[in-house]
Amino acid sequence: MYRLIISNNAVKQSSKIPKPIKEKVDERIKNLSDNPFPPDCVKLKSSKSSYRIRQGEYRVVYTVD
């Protein structure tokens, strides 16, 4: 299991998401602790350890160390 560290900025930004969508985004983030490489993740070219997942029109960018 991986440990999640969520930045203060991410918490602040997520508070602006409508509640039904935020619940889905939060679930996707929680699932990253079990599998940080879900089938729909995209490796970002700008960093060797950064990835992105989407939930509807929202993106979650994260780094795996």
Image (cartoon, helix red, strand yellow):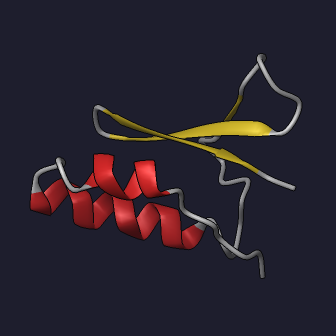
The answer to which image quadrant residue 36 occupies is: bottom right
Above/below status of 46 relative to 12 = above
Q: Residue at x 89, y 30 (%)?
A: 48
Give the position of the C terminus as an image quadrant. bottom right
Q: Say whether residue 17 is left or right of residue 60.
A: left
Q: How many marks?
A: 0
- Residue at the far front: name it: 8
Residue 11 lies, in percent from the top left, at 37, 58
Q: Say whether residue 6 is left or right of residue 57.
A: right
Above/below status of 41 relative to 24 = above
The answer to which image quadrant residue 2 occupies is: bottom right
Residue 26 lies, in percent from the top left, at 37, 66
Q: Say whether residue 30 is left or right of residue 65.
A: left
Q: Residue at x 63, y 67 (%)?
A: 5
- Residue at the far top: name it: 45
Give the position of the N terminus as an image quadrant. bottom right
Above/below status of 40 relative to 48 = below
Q: Residue at x 74, y 37 (%)?
A: 50
Above/below status of 14 relative to 46 = below
Residue 56 lies, in percent from the top left, at 29, 39
Q: Nearer the viewer, residue 55 or 10?
A: 10
Q: Residue at x 13, y 61 (%)?
A: 20
